[in-house]
Image: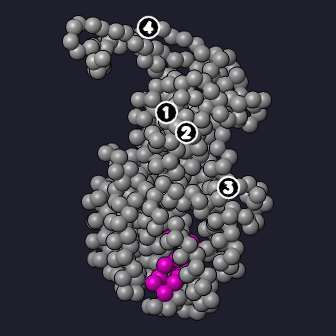
Amino acid sequence: MKKINLILILSILLTISCAKDEYDGPAAGASYIVKEVQVVQTVPGPEVTVTVNVPTPIPPPDYDFNRKGISTVYYDGQTKRLKMAAALGAAMNSNSSTKEGITNMFNNGEGFSDATLNGTGKKVGNKTAAYGSATVKPQFDGWITDFVDNVIPAWNDNASKGVPGKYTDPGTDPRSVYVNKQGKEYNQVFMKGLIGGMAADQIINGYLSKTKLDTGKADNDSGVFGYKSPGAAENNVTKMEHYWDEGFGYLYGLDDQTNPQLGASGDVLLNKYLKKIEASDEPGIAKKIYDAFIMGRAAITAKNYTLRDEQAKIIKVELSKVIAYKASYYMRSGGDKITAGKWADAFHALSEGYGFILSLQFTQKEDGSPYMTNAEVNAILAELDAGDGFWDHTEATLDAIAQKIETATGVPN
């Protein structure tokens, strides 16, 4: 049997069908419409042509998908993990924290002051670098240990080179930071590490990966529902639809699903920093990502997996830019603060940058590779850790690191 090569000769509107049993749109009585487009296939050899129909979804205006009048979109597990992440950040900046307490929250999903987060089976630790190198999760565990064993006991001491404690900048409205002996402010390192290590990794390398999505392809093709959304009496969501929604949830889980504002209250991960990049470095990036989420979800229901993968790629590439911009920015910002003699500000910025640099290994470029490999990331972190860490750096050394990031990622400084 000869291999068929697809050559698009013409695109003709063949039918427009109102799939009322598939989707009810956001407006009462509206239908989710799928256009079927006619294409021509040419078979090598004798002149033989066949006609196939390629479904093309007309997406809703926002991320609102319904089946029989009930929303099929839900991502409560992602919402819980984003709240857990914020609580962990607070715990990594409190001298009342214990190693057992933070570890229990991180690895077991228990011990949160918000009782709704306990007993859910959801955890942050097992979603950290779940698709990345096995070297990453131990780095987070090590940060917890250093914070509790060395920073908290020195909480009321003055930090200096090689000595953990509190450092306060001079001035009328100074910043104070609680740092380890290298100048790391651990709540910043930890949270910015989770931006890539959990949120981006789960979206880019997990839920929106072809590998993950295609585990539900057979069921999606056959209309087999594997999940039941809130309010439904029976299963009404396919596995592939739900996987896509879970990826959506790691970005918008604390935001407004149908009218995202970004910088959602309590969200300290990707949503917060996408807002910053939208407002400064790359206006329009947020709409591009949101629209791709909508179109990709519509493509799944239309069973148009080529279109689905195109939208997934847009999301991965654009979200990765958020990490790239901030990794570079905080290196340059930290250098500026050192030159200005504002070491507390510098420690804060460099701690953020440290976490963003770790996050670079979870990104994805147009060609599908990360901006930096695990080894390349660790080499830069080793530069930052050398000697007495942040204390030994200058604006020049940090600008050089920023330049390495900009060269690898292609983002401007």
Disc 4 from disc 1: Cα separation: 22 Å
Q: Which residues are magenta?
A: 175-189
Q: Which residue corresponds to the image point at 29% horizontal and 77% vertical from the top-left?
A: 397
Q: Earlier in the sequence, mark 2 or mark 3?
A: 3
Judge by depth and name the residue closer to the eye, 170 or 148.
148
Q: Earlier in the sequence, mark 4 or mark 1?
A: 4
329 over 261 or under it: above or below: below
Residue hosting label 2: 244
Q: Which residue corresponds to the image point at 59% horizontal and 43% vertical from the top-left?
A: 246
Residue hosting label 3: 122
* Quarter of the rendering occupied by the C terminus: bottom left
Foreground disc of the pair 3, 1 = 3
Residue 41 seen:
yes
Q: Magenta stretch: residue 241 in it?
A: no
**Are discs 2 and 1 less than 8 Å apart at CB?**
yes
Residue hosting label 4: 14
Disc 2 from disc 1: Cα separation: 8 Å
Residue hosting label 1: 296
